[in-house]
Amino acid sequence: MEKKYMNKNKLTSIIGALLSLIFTLSACAQDHQQNENRLKSITSIIKNSILLNNQKNLIPIVGLADKHFAAINLGFDYQIAFDSLLNKYTAVKSIDANKYKDSTTLNDLEDDLKYYNTIIIAVTDEMTANGKYLNFITNIAKNKNVIVALFGEGKSLDAFDNSNFPIVWTPQINEEAAMVLPQIIFGGIAAQHTLTKGYSGKYTIGSGYTTVATRLKYTVPEDAGVNTEELKEIDNIVNEGIAGKAAPGMVVLVAKDGKVIYNKAFGYHTYDNLRADKVTDLFDMASVTKVTATTPSVMRLVEQNKLKLDTNIGFYIAKARNTPMNAINVREVMLHQAGFIPYIPFHNYIKEGDYSVDSSVAFPTKVADGYYIKNGFFNDFMWPKMLNSPIKTRGSYVYSDISMYVMQDIIEHITEKPEDKYVLDNFYTPLGMHTAGYLPRNRFPKDRIVPTEDDKVFRKTLLTGYVHDQGAALKGGVAGHAGLFANANDLAIFYQLMLNKGTYGGEQYFKPETVDMFTTKQSNISRRGLGFDRWDPDLTKKYPSSLASPQTYGHTGYTGIGVWVDPSRGLIYIFLSNRVNPTVSEQLGRLNIRPRIQDAIIKAVDKGNTKR
């Protein structure tokens, strides 16, 4: 059994490395001319790709929250590429039909699709000639939403004359085409063309539907006017950081004008160099939780008029009414001007008998592997201690984690849901952010999550998938200030939504004025927006980097995370690392890794804009 498990892990690692290699579209050491040629190829494929049978406007796909996707591998040569691009947009289960090869009708496969309502199938002309496959597609289309990606000369189009499900067809059969068609299906690329000749009684000249792009596109830097060569400085800085022990591994993503033009993983999960970082890996977001979970929840509730920024805390939290917090208003909390002390080291208050190595009714809250805190520790000790903490600096800017514990409690009172469920239902699932969320060990294998600290003092274990922040951990892993895990692509989706002023995937999540209010400067005494950190007007600080524009907003995280959006450049920069592994290190800051990468990106983008 042990040997079998190891072999499976090895296979998973190989496949993961392959996917990372194939789909880090601009990350390989390709020169500018190669990518120019590649862009011509991509453009040609797009020009020759036709969307048919879209009378119900099913493409680009909307309403992800109501759909459960499966992609059926009937033997398409470029299925790995195809599936990987699908999974950039939402969770799509890959099902290999080869295991049903003894079935003459594929009835068993049809039965195994009972939990999926939207089926995506890649086929070629030759595969469509197989009556078994054609019958299978026709049968499942009777009860489920089916989308066919057809590759080849089009000689099999007449086989679909009686079909009404969407077909995205391209004459090319290659890996590049396999990466374009999923983007048309999900709206990363617009369908723009119609048939230039007739192929059947139904698919006549001029047939076809046009769409608009609604989601991120995955492409080469040259597609956004950026020279690939200019981005190689990112690799140099990251490699310097890893060599300098700033972190064992890092992931960098760059999106420009709604196009992901760079997404690359470097280094390893830990310094033992056993598991390489992949772009699909999940990282502990630390304080980026504040702007990717709690702040959006506040934005939504403010829009719904359920939460008022100038109403006091005591109005929403009964337990706060007889505490120093009572009269402080929500706006002050969101600006970090409430006067809260920055941090309470709750783990230092734990005594013998407060925790157990096993779970039980008395010790229900899991803090880490082999560590369970006693029932009521948060409600009876941590929360009262925060509510009654002294208000020392009200009216001044003092960054405090307590602020987001407070906002979490307000959100949960108003929504009557735990914050982890609220953000999943309202944002992550409908946006297609299928790695983002709290408590990742409940949803993902351990090896997909990048470890943080080897905690020798408090939890006495290597933290993998359990939040690094001690207070959030003692709360059970779901907190307003920390606890979120995600990969770079999911962050890119969320911050493209912000860059789009509240719209993504054909759905509106926020009003433009709400996005503007929370992300622009809202304080007379600090650089902050509401929840969001921002560019610092004190140019000596060079924050978040020397070249960042005054419009830049985002946040950093203690574990070595950085997310920055520059609306003036249409730019998203995401930096992920585990700089606290094996223990807290200041090298990331000393080597100025995050700001230097940001400056390198801006130089490349600005140089491209100058040449345009």
Image (tube, rainbow, N blue to C red):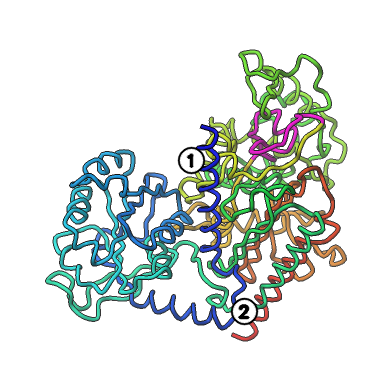
| Mark 1 or mark 2, earlier in chain | 2
Q: Which amino acid does label 1 sit on?
A: Asp
Q: Does the magenta stretch include residue 390?
A: no
Q: Residue 227 carries which label?
A: 2
Residue 481 falls within the magenta-colored stretch: yes
Q: Nearer the viewer, residue 611 or 452?
A: 452
Mark 1 surroundings within 10 Å by alpha-carbon count, few (fewer than 14), some (14 through 19), many (20 or more): few
**Which residue appears at 42% of the width and 68% of the height?**
175
Spatial CA distance of label 1 from label 2 is 39 Å
Q: What residue is at 37 percent from the left and 46 percent from the top?
A: 67
In the rendered image, residue 255, in percent from the top left (x then y), is placed at 59, 66
Main secondary structure along the magenta-highlighted residues: loop
Q: Is residue 245 visible?
A: yes
Please give the name of the residue rendered at 32% of the width and 70% of the height, measured from the top-left corner: 210
| Left or right, 562 with reference to 21 | right
Q: Where is residue 159 in the image (x, y as percent from the top left)?
A: 16, 64
Disc 1 on helix, strand or loop?
helix
- In the rendered structure, the answer to whether residue 564 lies left or right of residue 134 reads right
**Compared with residue 504, is residue 604 higher up or lower down, i.e. above or below?**
below
On-image quarter of the C terminus? bottom right
Observer-nearest residue: 567 or 262? Answer: 262
Q: What stretch is highlighted in magenta?
A: 457-483
